[in-house]
Image (spheres, rainbow, N blue to C red):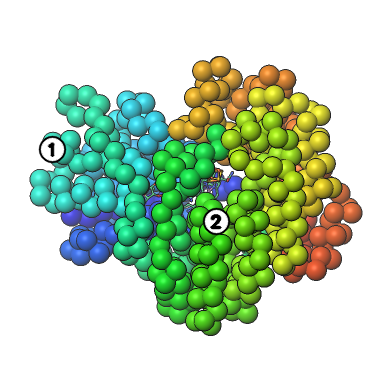
Amino acid sequence: MKIMLIEPPKKFWFVMGNYLPPPYNLLLLAAIIEKEFPSIELKVIDCQAEDLDWIKLEERIKQEKPDIVGSGSHATCNVFTTIRTLDLAKGINPNIMTLTGGSHFTALDDATLAEFPVIDVITRYEADKTIVDLLKHFSRHGLTKRGLEQISGIAFISENGFIRTPDRPPLTNAELETLPFPAYHFVPLERYHFALMSDNPYIILEGSRGCTHQCSFCSQSGFYRRQWATKSVKRIVDEMEWMYNELGSRFFWFTDDNFCGGSPQLVEELCNELLRRGLNGDNIEWFAQMRVDSILKCKNILGLMNRAGNYWQLVGGESPFAEVLDMYQKGIRGDQTVEAIKLLRKHNILAQLMIVLGHEKETHTSIQKTMHWATEVVKPDIIISMLLTPYPGTPMFTELDQKGRIIDKNWTNYDMIHAVCDMEHLTAPELQYELYMAYRHVYDSWIRRFSGIFARNKYKRRAYWYYLRLGVIRQLKRLVPT
Ligand code: B12
Ligand code: SF4
């Protein structure tokens, strides 16, 4: 049996500049397949890294003659590229078994399968265990859907119609701990980069999964059912050490939605273990994202984190207004964001503030106030503003859909920089314009540019030089309907 896992050609998120991320989801699944089924022939094809367009990908699939093709979409904005990939495979050979998974397909399994019969099986929620059961089934019974009802955590169309089998619970600590290291040997590691952030190759790793919070716009809490699980500190540092020694990695990106679940004890233990093994800010750089309240809990160890290599933190502040933070079910206050950003900067950790604009009651004035708060009160190192996007599977999607506010269900536009809703006071085109103006407010200011270019923090200097050349504002202007 031969399996091809494909990261298709896709558009990148221009707001963060020139980057090429390794397809961590596929590399993890590949490692699991390699471990459980050593005799299965396996290929991971990353079209970006191998410069394959759709035509070359088609040739490649023809050459490889896989029995199973799998592809995931990372975010809702890529679902059509995933479907196109599976369609391509089916077009070459209708007997190829096609698989996909991830948050979007989990939330909309029935609608997607009904609309796109080129998808044979959707794995729902995490696929780490499901993929093993599926492949065992195919190894024993051949590439047939008959009998798949016995496998938990999937959806498919059988002879009798749509079938969704019982869900699997989220992975536990023990299960995360025993996952193999991602199979980075399948891809050309040296090609992965994130120019805004580092000169070193870009590697992704997971410390923990899930989130116990429930922000109304976020698909993660639903996907992990408000559970959080972590690998042990030893296991995380073993993985980083392996990446450092064997793969030559120096720039690490943690996927954790809230680094170490926001536990100061765990963060401290992790940083001390890194330092004990000789990994520190002199030889590694690591990025993580943390909730505002978690940063405050970690206020006494931010210096330690920086010494251990944490040089960049992404922080979801979203809004200064209590009523908006409540609507987002964020569970934080604006003044906590101000404090958290101040602390990060004090400890030389680059503070990237995320803002979510365009909620139901948003007005031109509230956006101006939000942006003014961000630049004049919070004063982070960089600001990324996004538009509220109702991702399938979130409470926000259900609510706005019921109210008829969602005017665009072209999933390609679900990247948080395309306006897809008409809200109470601002229409989608008006919101699109507001986003453009929000970026102008932040980056079209010579005072801010100078303070960025001459900043004390070398990563901030880098980011501002980079942003100056990037032309993000111009690209955002192009999205505004004329
Ligand atoms: C790293 C990361 C990035 C990297 C890119 C990584 C990449 N590989 O492309 C960067 C920073 C560039 C990025 C960009 C964006 N991202 Co991003 N990103 C993440 C992050 C933090 C980690 C992803 C990851 O590797 N997770 C770990 C893996 C193991 O989980 P997984 O992908 O879900 O895979 C499991 C299952 O879903 C399933 N599965 C997945 N694929 C497949 C395929 C097959 C065949 C099968 C069977 C199963 C399967 O099995 C896997 C194992 O259980 C996630 C949040 C998170 N913690 O997951 C956000 C996240 C996925 N990103 C998100 C978003 C919105 C974006 C952006 C639009 C920017 C933005 N506004 O934030 C862009 C989109 C760019 C693009 N066009 O692709 C959202 C997606 C929301 C949604 N429902 O669409 C998330 C969930 C963040 C959030 N909290 O909202 N991102
Ligand atoms: S936005 Fe962050 S804190 Fe909120 S639910 Fe999503 S992952 Fe959790």
Image quadrant of ligand 2 equals: top right
At label 2, the amino acid type is: Gly
Residue 396, how many percent across, how many down? 54, 29
In the depicted view, which residue is nearer to us: 395 or 408? 395
Residue 215, how many percent across, how many down? 55, 38
Helix, strand or loop under label 2: helix
Q: Which residue is located at x 81 percent, y 65 percent? A: 455
Sequence-wise first label, 1 or 2:
1
Q: What whole-number distance in Å separates the C-alpha atoms at marks 1 and 2?
A: 42 Å
* Mark 2, residue position: 262
Q: Is residue 447 left or right of residue 301?
A: right
Determine if residue 436 is in view. no
* Mark 1, residue position: 147
Disc sitting over residue 329 in the figure: none
Residue 443, how many percent across, how many down? 80, 49
Whether residues under marks 1 and 2 lie with C-beta atoms below 8 angstroms apart, the answer is no
Residue 31, how many percent across, how many down? 31, 62
